[in-house]
Amino acid sequence: MIHIKLNIQCKILVFIFFLSSCTAVNRPIANLNKFSQGSMNQFTNDSLGVKIDFYGNANFGSKYIDLKDVKSVFRKRKIIFPLKNIVFWGSYDVTRNPMYFVGSIETFLDVSKFSVDTSMYQCIYYRSIKKSKNNIITSIAIPYSKDLFLLIREIRTEITDMQESVRDVLNTIKTSYSSLAYGEKFVKERTEKEIDYFSIAESAFKDRGYTNYLYPRDTLEKLVLQNKNSQFASELFKSYSSFLGESIQYDNATKQQQHSVGKTSVSIDEIVEKIKGHRVVMFNENHLQPRCRLLINLLLPKLYKEGFNVLALESLSEDEERINRSGFPNVESGFYTRDPNMANLIRTARMYGLKVIGYEDFENTSNRDLQQAKNLIKKSEIVKKNQGKLIVLAGGGHIEEGDAGEIKSMAQYFKKLSKIDPYTINQVKYLSINEVNDSVYVMDSKMWDGYDLYLSNNLNSDKIVIGANDFCRRYSISNTNSTKSGKSAIYIYNEKEYQLDNTAIPVYLSLSKKDSVQIDFPKGIYRYLKRDQYGTIIHQEIIEVE
């Protein structure tokens, strides 16, 4: 039955193809485009019978960019642009390189010089990557029907590191097109109920009235094994694993890059010396590496003495009023604020009287980075208050200052609108994943631009840091009924916070795999809970640190 339907669909597509061949945009097909915004921006078209998961920062159609502007970018660089049967176009809201794409229907396409790959649904696609001066041109050919291809051309401009960018392009292709489905696979995919992984994880995390980190992590792990086609479920699983202190491999090339560049060990005081003369300092982070937040936490007491009085977090929800009042985050404060290191950064900021603000674009405007910059300027009041000094933590490339053509980063928009040049610190490019020696290095950045300082962060994030870390006392926790499988977790709470709100984020969290755990505690009263994967309390005690 499905085979008969597909044959009829092919005939209809061929008819529509020739009917619309005299216009640039194939309206009958383009009007059926559907885009589901999320971590992965899912493109589907029932007429084509195709599903593709683009990255969530892909913006489609005239709402974001005119077709003529995309065409101009291609033509300016003498790259072939389709004259007819265009079904979609757009740009990426990126901060490293301006990126533009166009999708069109092509007949009898010669793919003999393309590389062949296969999606998780066993759907074949063809890919080609070419370099031209400081541009990378990508072509993806999808043979969704007999003699008909959906050809997606993409151009990345203003490339400064060609080798790294080509590697990034290839990784992007494999990520996006791993979930490609067309033909019978598309029909099957459309008939199956979409799994709401985020709601499942949220329910497992908080619906019992307290934070349960292990249950959503284990639940997602099972779902990933059952539904190998879900990139979103996989990324969500990685996030919950990172909250529990597990090392997440984000970039296989990081370690190699780190060893190929000169570096100099640097102290916290020396980093402060580089920062203190600036009114605004911006750090980027790898969302899966808590050590990125720990570094700022270690710097914060000394930066406070240098006049920094506002901490801005991309990851913060619209819960900042409660945080500034209570001094600690809970389950509703954001997603990445659930990491104990991020939560402790907030605690340190409030301890020293810094105002904590969020600046994310919750309105989903057409230009996320521009709106972030506007929010940052407005909420920090950095322009109005001449004595104010601002610390910003952002994801990935949002703080890049290099020339990216028309598409700008949040930091670039911030500089243009505020007339303040931020001091930007990249701790992602050379971030150590598995090499941990509790050190930080300044990397030789003579060959790079875009950031004022490159650091390699080798800190051990398995610790409690709240305020000045000079007077912490080491305490040995006897891990009663330890399970080597890691099916239980250690939760350490500030006792006062726990009494006020048992959905408060722990000050420390780890999988329970050792018979005893050595932890340096700041002065205070803490509650130690050990829970199994379902949240049942196996052991609890009060720890007082004088």
Image (cartoon, rainbow, N blue to C red):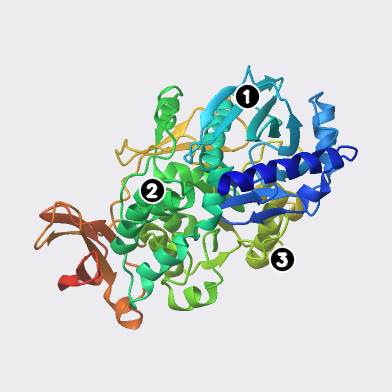
Q: Front-most of 384 and 254? A: 254
The image's mark for residue 426 is: none
Give the residue number, with chain letter if any, for mark 2: 291
Indicate left or right for 97 with 202 as reference.
Answer: right
Amino acid marked by disc 1? Ser
What is the quadrant of residue 507 in the picture? bottom left
* Residue 513 image point, x, y percent: 17, 52
- Residue 51 shows up from this direction: no
Q: Secondary structure at mark 1?
A: strand
Q: Are marks 3 and 2 in contact (CB under 8 Å)?
A: no
- Residue 378 shows up from this direction: yes
Label 3, label 2: how many angstroms apart (C-alpha)? Answer: 33 Å
Give the residue number, with chain letter if any, for mark 1: 128
Amino acid marked by disc 3? Lys
What is the quadrant of residue 387 in the picture? bottom right
Q: Secondary structure at mark 3?
A: loop
Amino acid marked by disc 2? Arg
